[in-house]
């Protein structure tokens, strides 16, 4: 049963209140900081800036008083996808640096540069998962809605549905652990009835094949959850953001300015290290 406990391995969408300084930051500042770091990581295409971003993400997790082991659990479900993408990069990437040739055919040529690109891609995905997990672990639902609406508020002048869009984004993020819990309950119910999802050799392929019929009941349960949420919102006379007031307000403090400056400095350092391009030859030799 432990192999099918998905909820314990998903950190994106979860909230872990620890009362840290990062938790107390303004939600808009946390969103901007996460966006800047994600943009810097996506732009980076070398090993050194990705390693720096990994170190910064681990420091942020430590400052947020979140157990490192708990944060790293979020990478576990994505390992097969990361390995698959890295393998595609090794087989089909053609922008690798010059280096030792491991395999050369008429169709595929694998060099040290291809392994470098695969390592950068895999590490980038790991860091992105950690950054997004850190953001959701430190941001409550009401904070996420408030921050999204605050950042998109200038669009309200052109009659853009800012409140509705922010509500959709927050509900989507919070639905991830709910769907994971529903999938876990479905699989455990099937196992209790004697279903076999594959064990031992070729277990991964058997699990994927046996899980395909679970998508239909999971979709039905998701639609029921969405309908229940819609009925609850209608019962509370929800009509959108027009005329709504906030019970909880988030004032902007000096610590928020310091946090935003620190995020800009971290993103700037990652981009600067990336465009310096001083380490390509060193890493290619490492893979040779």
Image: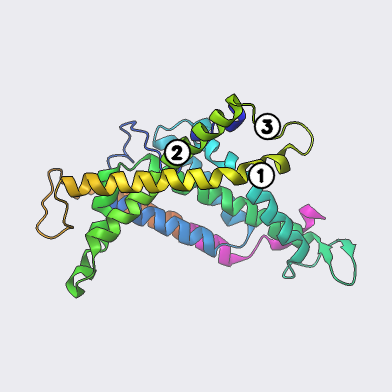
Element type at mark 2: helix
Q: Which residues are magenta?
A: 269-288
What colouring style does the render use? Answer: rainbow
- Outermost front residue: 193
Q: Mark 1 against mark 2, which lies toward the viewer?
A: 1
Comparing 180 with 277, the one in front is: 180
Is 237 in the magenta? no
Per the rendering, the mark at residue 208 is 1
Tell me what residue is drawn at x 15 percent, y 45 percent. 236
Q: Quadrant of residue 209?
A: top right
Q: Position of residue 16 (x, y in %)?
A: 37, 34
Q: Residue at x 63, y 44 (%)?
A: 79
Residue behind mark 3: 196
Overall secondary structure of the magenta section: helix
**Mark-to-mark CA distance, 3 and 2:** 38 Å
Pick the quarter of the image with the C terminus: bottom right
C-alpha span from label 1 to label 2:
32 Å
Residue marked by disc 2: 61
């Amino acid at each position: 049963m432990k192999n099918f406990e998905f909820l314990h391995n998903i950190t994106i969408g979860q909230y872990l209140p620890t009362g840290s300084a990062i938790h107390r930051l303004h939600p808009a500042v946390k969103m901007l900081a996460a966006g800047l770091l994600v943009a810097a990581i996506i732009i980076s295409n070398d090993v050194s800036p990705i390693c720096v971003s990994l170190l910064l993400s681990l420091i942020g997790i430590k400052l947020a008083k979140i157990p490192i082991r708990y944060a790293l659990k979020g990478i576990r479900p994505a390992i097969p996808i990361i390995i698959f993408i890295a393998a595609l990069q090794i087989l089909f990437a053609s922008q690798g640096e010059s280096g030792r040739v491991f395999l050369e055919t008429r169709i595929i040529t694998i060099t040290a540069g291809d392994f470098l690109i695969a390592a950068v891609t895999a590490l980038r995905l790991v860091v992105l998962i950690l950054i997004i997990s850190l953001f959701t672990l430190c941001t409550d639902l009401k904070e996420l809605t408030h921050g999204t609406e605050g950042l998109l508020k200038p669009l309200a002048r052109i009659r853009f549905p800012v409140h509705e869009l922010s509500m959709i984004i927050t509900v989507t993020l919070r639905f991830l652990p709910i769907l994971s819990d529903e999938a876990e309950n479905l699989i455990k119910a099937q196992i209790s009835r004697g279903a076999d999802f594959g064990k031992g050799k070729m277990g991964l392929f058997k699990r994927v094949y046996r899980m395909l019929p679970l998508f239909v009941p999971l979709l039905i349960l998701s639609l029921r959850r969405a309908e229940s949420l819609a009925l609850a919102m209608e019962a509370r006379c929800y009509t959108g953001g027009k005329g709504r007031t906030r019970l909880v307000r988030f004032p902007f403090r000096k610590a928020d300015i310091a946090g935003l400056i620190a995020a800009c400095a971290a993103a700037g350092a990652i981009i600067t290290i990336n465009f310096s391009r001083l380490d390509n030859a060193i890493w290619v030799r490492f893979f040779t």
